[in-house]
């Protein structure tokens, strides 16, 4: 470790176990003591990872491929985390603490990477077949005051408190959907026989029945079918956040198409693309409110409501021409706004004047001068944001008489720009 320089920000180091597979991830910083001990350097060590459990119950985490080495986290508390095996992936699986219920809980299907900053929603499986709990996990950089370098915060996704994902069904049909796994993604479309086996058994059930499992005979994995009744809104989480964030969906009244092998009975939607739309066509007579000369389709559209991505299912009508071919409606109401603006300021100067004494005129003690301000912001139709800030010159002059540092801040080279991009 290089401790010759003061480093108030945290640096990271790894320590491997002697004659063992474990790896301990640490963070440290180097600071100076205050007052008369200012020549003394203090080297402080922290755990690199802290996992915070904000759920109402206990949580169990373990490194992927090392699930027998469990770490228990009580409710409303945190624990440091280290890797059980340095050769295994740097990600963890979660499950609920079995001590708080009579059922044996299972590990989550997906994992959370501790080395990737971001937030995700994860479905937690329950063996008692009750409605699954959706949790949100955010991996963030710790602040200067927190005793770690990376903090992983886990809390329950509440539908009324801006969840990450929300499925809302405004159509008169029950919608069924699932996240395609690696096996189902190998083919662009599934055969009609496979789709009928996957969805067919769920067309005749009462509304409000909730979610259901579909077992795969050839593997231990399970496809999780989400059922959204008409007028229902439910929180959504991924089975596996590492797989493409897409949904394959259909609706109950598309069963005639489904069982006869029609391609437009099942559709895919990219959930992380704001404004993306997919459609499922309904057979004639599927909807009792169908008027003559109109074709009925159920659409799935991704919208944004504050920080929530809303997966909205709705019924759309399309006019039919004389030959019975549908005429596409105007897409003006489905466009996602793309916004951009740019601001240029030639120069900005701030002067600080000392007017404490009324007997003498005020004197300038500080001058902040800057030139060449440029601010640019844009939002694309895919909801990506770009922010750019440029500043050509910046200087702070100290006009106090006999000051030790007449120039407090100045640019290093006059030809460089200060550029901050996010």
Image (cartoon, helix red, strand yellow):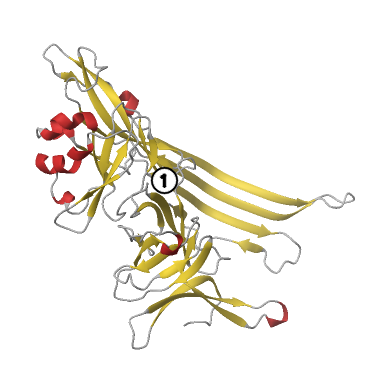
Q: Residue at x 76, y 63 (%)?
A: 401
Q: Nearer the viewer, residue 5 or 147?
A: 147
| x and y percentages locating residue 118 in the rendered image | 40, 55
Could you tell whether 266 is left or right of 403 in the image? Answer: left
For disc 1, the neighbor class at 10 Å (few under 14, some 14 to 19, many from 20) is many
| x and y percentages locating residue 60 in the rendered image | 41, 65
Taking the image as drawn, is residue 416 in sight? no
Residue lying farthest to the right in this orientation: 359
Q: Would you place residue 213 above or below residue 220 in this image?
A: above
Q: Residue at x 29, y 25 (%)?
A: 315
Residue lying farthest to the front in this orientation: 102
Quarter-of-image position of residue 182: bottom left
Quarter-of-image position of residue 5: bottom right
Could you tell whether 160 is left or right of 278 in the image? Answer: right
Identify the element where label 1 is drawn: loop
Q: Nearer the viewer, residue 288 or 242?
A: 288
Q: Nearer the viewer, residue 199 or 47?
A: 199
Q: Would you place residue 234 above or below residue 358 in this image?
A: above
Disc 1 designates what residue?
164
Q: Residue at x 31, y 67 (%)?
A: 64
Taking the image as drawn, is residue 193 in sight? yes
Q: Residue at x 30, y 39 (%)?
A: 227
| x and y percentages locating residue 6 in the rendered image | 56, 76
| x and y percentages locating residue 185 in the rendered image | 18, 50
- Number of marks in the image? 1
Quarter-of-image position of residue 260: top left
Q: Would you place residue 51 above or below residue 191 in this image?
A: below
């Amino acid at each position: 470790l290089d401790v010759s320089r003061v480093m108030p920000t945290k640096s990271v180091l790894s320590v491997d176990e002697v004659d063992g597979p474990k790896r301990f991830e640490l963070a440290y910083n180097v600071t100076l003591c205050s007052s008369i001990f200012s020549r003394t350097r203090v080297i402080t060590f922290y755990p690199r990872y802290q996992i915070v459990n904000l759920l109402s119950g206990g949580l169990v985490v373990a490194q992927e491929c090392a699930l027998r080495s469990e770490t228990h986290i009580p409710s409303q508390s945190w624990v440091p985390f280290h890797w059980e095996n340095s050769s295994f992936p740097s990600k963890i699986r979660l499950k609920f603490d079995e001590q708080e219920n009579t059922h044996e809980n299972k590990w989550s299907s997906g994992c959370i990477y501790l080395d990737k900053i971001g937030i995700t929603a994860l479905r937690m499986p329950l063996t008692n077949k009750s409605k699954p709990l959706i949790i949100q996990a955010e991996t963030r950089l710790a602040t200067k005051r927190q005793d770690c370098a990376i903090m992983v915060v886990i809390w329950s996704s509440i539908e009324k408190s801006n969840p990450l994902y929300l499925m809302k069904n405004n159509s008169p049909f029950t919608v069924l959907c699932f996240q395609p796994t690696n096996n189902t993604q190998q083919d662009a479309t599934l055969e009609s026989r496979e789709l009928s086996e996957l969805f067919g058994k769920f067309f005749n059930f009462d509304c409000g029945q909730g979610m259901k499992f579909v077992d795969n005979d050839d593997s231990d994995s399970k496809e999780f079918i989400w059922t959204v009744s008409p007028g229902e809104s439910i929180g959504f989480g991924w089975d596996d956040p590492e797989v493409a964030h897409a949904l394959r969906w259909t609706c109950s009244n598309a069963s005639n198409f489904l069982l006869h092998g029609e391609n437009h009975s099942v559709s895919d939607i990219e959930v992380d693309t704001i404004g993306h739309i997919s459609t499922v066509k309904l057979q004639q007579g599927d909807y009792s409110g169908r008027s003559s000369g109109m074709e009925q389709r159920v659409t799935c559209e991704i919208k944004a409501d504050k920080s929530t991505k809303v997966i909205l299912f709705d019924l759309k009508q399309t006019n039919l021409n004389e030959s019975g071919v549908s005429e596409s409606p105007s897409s003006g109401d489905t466009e996602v706004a793309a916004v951009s603006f740019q601001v240029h300021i030639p120069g900005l100067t701030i002067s600080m004047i000392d007017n404490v004494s009324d007997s003498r005129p005020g004197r300038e003690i500080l001058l902040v001068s800057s030139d060449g301000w440029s601010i640019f912001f844009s939002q694309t139709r895919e909801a990506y944001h770009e922010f750019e800030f440029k500043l050509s010159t910046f200087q702070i002059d100290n006009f106090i008489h006999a000051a030790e540092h007449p120039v407090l801040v100045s640019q290093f080279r006059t030809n460089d720009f200060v550029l901050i991009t996010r």
